[in-house]
Amino acid sequence: LCRGGLAERLCRLQNRERSAISFWRHQCISDDNTPSDKSGVLIVKILEIFEECTIQVAICQQLAQSPVTLSPEDAVINAEEPILKVLFTRETAAHLKSRPQDIIHIYPPWQKLLLQNADVPVIMNTYFSQKVLLSEHSEAREKTYGLKKTLIRKNIISLAQTFRLDDLDDKLHQEPSDNQVACAAQIRNNRDSKQHPLALNAVNDSLLEMVESQGAVGWREVQVRVVIQRVYCLPAREGCRSHTQGNKPLLSNGGMFCRLCLLVQDAYGMFSEVQLQSLSSTDDIEQYCRRWEGKSCCLAGMKILQRTTRGRALGLFSLIDSLWPPAVPLKVPGQSQDSEMMTTNLPPPSFCYILTVQSGEIHVEVDEEEQISNLYQPPAVHGLKEILRINGCNRRCSFWAQVLYQRLQTKHSVPIDQRDILLFVTDSTLQNVVHGIPKVVAVSVTASCVLSMEIGEALSAGSPLVFFKDALWGDGRIICVERTVLLLQKPLLCSAAGADLSELTGPVRLDELDSTTQANSICALRGTVVGVNESTAFSWPICDRCGNGKLELCPQDRELLYCNQCSKVVTTPVLKMQLEVFLSCPSRSQSTVKVKVWHEIRVALFVLLTMLLFLQTYEVQSVLGKEVGLLNCYVHSVTSHPNSVALEEIVLL
């Protein structure tokens, strides 16, 4: 807020007002009676209550004085006493919990408003109000009625009616009997709405109007109709990712550690993120995407968790920006909703409401049999070559790629379940490029991106084709962040936009090591061995069935090896050897190229023991001068002082 401006002054005034009201109520509770000063107190008896535009309107009979010993039911109403229309704010009404026949004391500074062409005066500024219980009979009645649900008539006034816009198509105003709802009713799953007499009757199409009319505490009596643009999972606070041992990370937010979320849009173009229940399995996300995306749904029982803006939620608004401008013309608030009055010349949204369900119940009714809405914008699929040429940053992109290699980033200061994963991917648009664009790109999967168990198992098992939906592109990097979804199957609805999405047919080619190779990338390497680091060379036997590298001597026969994981004797172990060699590479003739290579030999047990016994007699000279063919390597580091490159031999998925 601008310092000294009207908004800041109004904010301070509202804060002082709330403080004064809270202090007055606390003082009344502490004194356990009504304030002693009775001057200017307006005493009324409620005859009827209804709600209109979030204000509770009470039709009351003014009393000359409060009965001292009689209950409210026995209080005699004088026909000559005036009838008043008393307005209570939502907060005051929630504090009073009034019902007909209650007696209310309204303390100054209340105000009386006399309207033209109206016989009933209006009482406003009723913040300092107190319900009076006059006897034990009243207290017993209060406890009895407190357990019952009070029906309050709600007059829903549409903007079209307020501005006197004749619209025969949208009749939101209904008869009062259709709009009665239970103040304390818990609206259950909307699938059962037909069986409830208090089912949601009024359906609106404006999220903003619902928020403004129903308030931040949530709405139960009306529904708002929206279109589901995206379905995804967000990690819960207690959520975590688990990884398997070794170099095959398995990402999972299983259990109750992720929350199903919807990005919805109304007919006026406004977006909201709806956070639903926690999922027992992230594998459900794919079926929710297929069943719900693009469908219309009705929201009810929502409450506002947060009102966020572009500056505070860049990730959310980058997804919203990818869905803007809308696919069809939008409605304009305050105007007649004829087709010629709709327009798409509107700026993108600058704020968004984060909604959540009340009481942990599902309040989303999706018509899965309905056709896809015209407002829905499916993900626009591009080839990786096209994505690498996109200008700008924080742009959402979707693509279909083959994962070649995955690696858990080694940041020792960060817990293992919070580290990023690097996925090296390619597609036909990159493999067919001659020069100028890399044949493989790295996709960074952050810890906030929820991946299903199915994706993790597929990455560990082989080289899958993965659909990356709504990944983030910027500063030359592709990042999977919150609200990015990875699927093994392409969505039924997606826009290819002329991209080449043909699958790879031949062998995958990597870029060869050269002067442009960067760290944390993969490449192909060829050269001549010019040196060996003997101090780091070692070898060890592993199980030929499960790959267990911790073999033990068999308890029954000390001359045999035993695998605890397989619970079997290993007769033909695999000898795994690690060796660091220095290469002379024509593509980087001025650099020292150090490669950590792995080698596996399947040998008989006698040969293995012999090799382990006489390993120190291994001739280094037999390795020097050897030509190394195309090795697939991961680049650990590239330094200029000294000019060196450190690599590690890898096996592609």
Image (tube, rainbow, N blue to C red):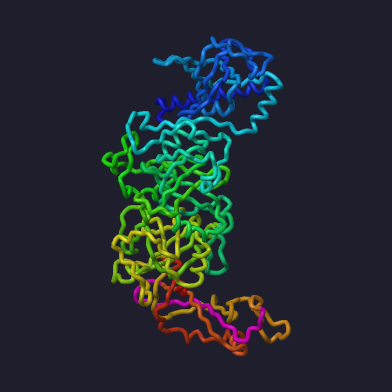
In depth, the one of 23 and 525 nearer the eye is 23
Residue 251 relative to residue 310: left or right: right
Position in image of residue 226 (x %, y %): 42, 45
Residue at position x 59%, y 19% in the image: 104
Number of labels in the image equals 0
In depth, the one of 357 and 584 nearer the eye is 357
> Looking at the image, can residue 352 be seen?
yes
**Quarter residue 258 falls in:** bottom right
In the image, residue 404 sits, relative to residue 572, either above or below, namely above
Q: Is residue 582 within the magenta segment?
A: yes
Position in image of residue 31 (x %, y %): 67, 20
In the image, residue 142 sits, relative to residue 134, either above or below, namely below
Position in image of residue 119 (x %, y %): 44, 14
> Looking at the image, can residue 639 be seen?
no
Position in image of residue 381 (x %, y %): 35, 60
In the image, residue 522 sits, relative to residue 168, either above or below, namely below
In depth, the one of 47 and 66 nearer the eye is 47
Residue most extreme to the left:
340
The magenta span reads: 567-591
Residue 263 relative to residue 541: left or right: left
Residue at position x 67%, y 85% in the image: 560
**Quarter residue 212 falls in:** top left
